Image (cartoon, helix red, strand yellow):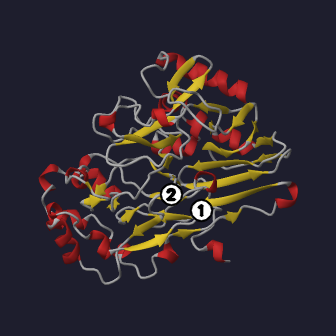
Amino acid sequence: MNTVTALRTVKSKVKKIVEAQLEDTGGLLRLAPCWVPRSFLQPGKRLKLHPDDLYAFGLNRGGIDERWFASTTPAANENRTADEGLSYVVAGRQRFTLQQAVQESGAGLIGKRIWRKYGKWPVYSKFFDNMGPIPHHMHQSEKWAKLVKQEGKPESYYFPPQHNNVGNNFPYTFMGLEPGTTKKQVRECLENWNRGDNGILDLSRAYRLRPGTGWLIGPGILHAPGSFCTYEPQWGSDVFGMFQSLVEGREVPWSLLVKDMPKSKHRDLDFIIGQLDWEANVDPTFKDNHYLEPVPVADTADAGYIDRWVVYGKINRKQYFTAKELTIDPGVKCTIKDQGAYGLITTQGKGKMNHLSLDCPKLIRFHELTEDEVFCTESTAQAGVVFENTSDVEPLVVLRYFGPDVNPDAPDLGAYRR
């Protein structure tokens, strides 16, 4: 609902409305769907967005292939709308961005520690969903992003089974570079940009994607995500550099390689290659250091529910984000306590979350409100949220992602093997 049709709320009233809404819902904020197009990709049609609305922003803007969750991060698209990428809170007939709510309510929503350190909700998540692969690209680290007054971007992937009944055209992801690859070889690929396919994928390795698994990817690592619908907790930034010149016959302009680099460096190939985390890219044990499988939080299956870590581990010794998947059997009610605020999306079934209804839609119109997305405050998460599956026939499944350093008890990489 991040469109000009949204009803605006005077900023000074936002805090009072948020407080009233939290009182009514038991510490929760209802969020409207936030749709984002990408001009250089083809939608995969698994976001449940009505097919007539795939180009709701206009054909020139590209198809809608992403839905962002609990986002206070603007989308870095050319010719974007003023609020593109920003999630909206729905409070009766009132609409305002989650960014406004956080600015006005601060620690009351995201907790004192995150508010004091970052002054904002510094993470977000999304579904990205494409018919084919994304160009081989990297996201800048904090060091390089600062040069253009941006933030670096570590990210993670989880492939929810509910959104991957089909794998589309290329269910494989190229990641990193083959061990032994040289910087000279990558430089030659950039030199050959306008000759057609620049051959960057010849230097990489593809991994087959499997529903219910995921990956943890740090800044500076080349990756070409495949055609799975992907849940992607990440840092609140949209910086990137595309290193592949041709994808499925479609040109990738040089401008998408250098869009987040200083203008004086747009033809400096050594500078461009220098932004890669070289050791991480050519790591001979790359999969061991990045691959994820779910890890149960506790042994609760006999109680009719199971909570699982789906994103965990650290990047350069820091926990930027984590995520869990909660599955509740039909008719079961449970109380779930977490250590910090989170954004939640429902991927299957229907039920309740404190005083809010949860209902996973089958088809969504562009301007339609849904009952599948929620933001939970830190204090509410710590006190415990009551989830109830009101269905007689299917599980209630929700994904929730957390901010930096919220879950020090989260597993380390490789925990699924133990």
Q: Residue at x 74, y 52 (%)?
A: 327
**404 is higher (above) or lower (below) than 411:** above
Q: CA distance from mark 2 to mark 1?
A: 8 Å
The quadrant holding residue 198 is: bottom left
Q: Which residue is mark 1?
A: 211
Q: Amino acid at mark 1?
A: Pro
Q: Residue at x 64, y 77 (%)?
A: 417
Task: Left or right? Give the position of 345 relative to 82.
Answer: right
Q: Which residue is mark 2?
A: 228
Comparing 413 with 207, the one in front is 207
Look at the image and tell me whether residue 255 can be seen.
yes
Task: Left or right? Give the position of 272 relative to 387.
Answer: left
Residue 299 in the image: x percent, y percent? Answer: 80, 63
For the residue labelled by badge 2, is the local secondary structure a helix, a strand or a loop? loop
Residue 414 in the image: x percent, y percent? Answer: 59, 74
Circle 1 residues within 10 Å: few <14, some 14–19, many ≥20: some
The reply to whether discs 2 and 1 touch (Cβ–Cβ < 8 Å) is: yes
The quadrant holding residue 48 is: top right
Q: Residue at x 30, y 53 (%)?
A: 145
Comparing 29 with 35, the one in front is 35
Residue 218 in the image: x percent, y percent? Answer: 42, 63
Circle 2 residues within 10 Å: few <14, some 14–19, many ≥20: many
N-term-proximal mark, 2 vs 1: 1
Q: Residue at x 46, y 28 (%)?
A: 2
Residue 372 in the image: x percent, y percent? Answer: 64, 37
Q: Amino acid at mark 2?
A: Phe
Q: Quadrant of the C terminus?
A: bottom right
